[in-house]
């Protein structure tokens, strides 16, 4: 299975080891922002969720001018991950416990007007 990044116009083999430049910054999954070398289907599902949210709100789900800034904005909405919410996160980012801990916000408030089934779909894409 191959995926094509429209910005970089190159093929990326799923489950292959790749560098961070595999997507537009606004659609990068947290594991890519943390520097994980594995590019797999969940990374694409995250991007689909970001695009879906953008279609609903008419703005980026997560805006940031840098990878760090983008992570802060992701955590501000979804909550700062920990080993309970994301098993293995401390191996990706050992200092996660030292950053400001944010509780998750109500996703439905972020995508006002979206029916509950749509909020559930968005949640599956970006919260799991």
Image (cartoon, rainbow, N blue to C red):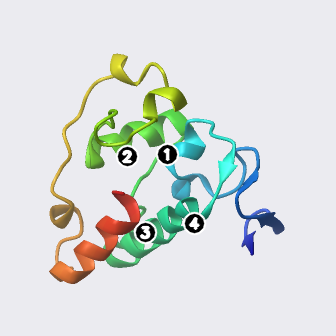
Element type at marker 3? helix
The residue labelled by disc 4 is: 44
Give the residue at x 72% y 49%.
Answer: 21
Mark 2 and mark 3 in contact? Answer it, CB < 8 Å: no
Q: Position of residue 32 (x, y in %)?
A: 59, 45
Q: Residues within 10 Å of mark 3 (few under 14, many from 20)?
A: many
Task: State the image quarter where residue 123 is shown.
Answer: bottom left
Name which of mark 3 and mark 1 comes first in the sequence. 1
Mark 4 and mark 3 in contact? Answer it, CB < 8 Å: no
Name which of mark 1 and mark 2 comes first in the sequence. 1
Q: Position of residue 12 (x, y in %)?
A: 78, 63
Give the residue at x 56% y 53%.
Answer: 28
Q: Nearer the viewer, mark 4 or mark 2?
A: 4
Name which of mark 2 and mark 3 comes first in the sequence. 3
The residue labelled by disc 3 is: 49
Q: Residue furthest right?
A: 10
Residue 74 is tagged as 2
Report the number of numbered marks. Answer: 4
Q: Residues within 10 Å of mark 1 (few under 14, many from 20)?
A: some
Q: Residues within 10 Å of mark 2 (few under 14, many from 20)?
A: many
Query: Could you give the CA–CA distance between mark 4 and mark 3, rounded to whole angstroms?
Result: 9 Å
User: Against 39, is 82 above or below?
Assistant: above
Q: Position of residue 112 (x, y in %)?
A: 17, 72
Q: Position of residue 64 (x, y in %)?
A: 48, 45
Element type at marker 4? helix
Query: Could you give the CA–CA distance between mark 3 and mark 1, rounded to whole angstroms?
Result: 13 Å
In the rendered structure, the answer to whether residue 44 lies left or right of residue 101 reads right
Query: Could you give the CA–CA distance between mark 1 and mark 2, rounded to whole angstroms?
Result: 8 Å
Residue 116 is tagged as none
Query: Could you give the CA–CA distance between mark 4 and mark 1, rounded to whole angstroms?
Result: 12 Å
Element type at marker 2? helix
The residue labelled by disc 1 is: 30
């Amino acid at each position: 299975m191959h995926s094509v990044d429209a910005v970089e116009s190159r093929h990326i083999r799923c489950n292959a080891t790749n560098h961070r430049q595999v997507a537009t910054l606004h659609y990068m999954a947290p594991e890519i922002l943390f520097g994980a070398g594995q590019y797999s289907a969940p990374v694409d599902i995250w991007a689909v969720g970001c695009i879906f949210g953008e279609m609903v709100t008419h703005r980026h789900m997560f805006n940031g001018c840098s990878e760090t800034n983008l992570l802060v904005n992701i955590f501000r909405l979804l909550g700062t991950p920990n080993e309970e919410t994301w098993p293995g996160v401390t191996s990706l980012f050992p200092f996660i416990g030292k950053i400001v801990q944010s509780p998750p916000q109500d996703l439905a408030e972020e995508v006002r007007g979206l029916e509950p089934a749509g909020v559930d779909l968005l949640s599956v894409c970006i919260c799991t």
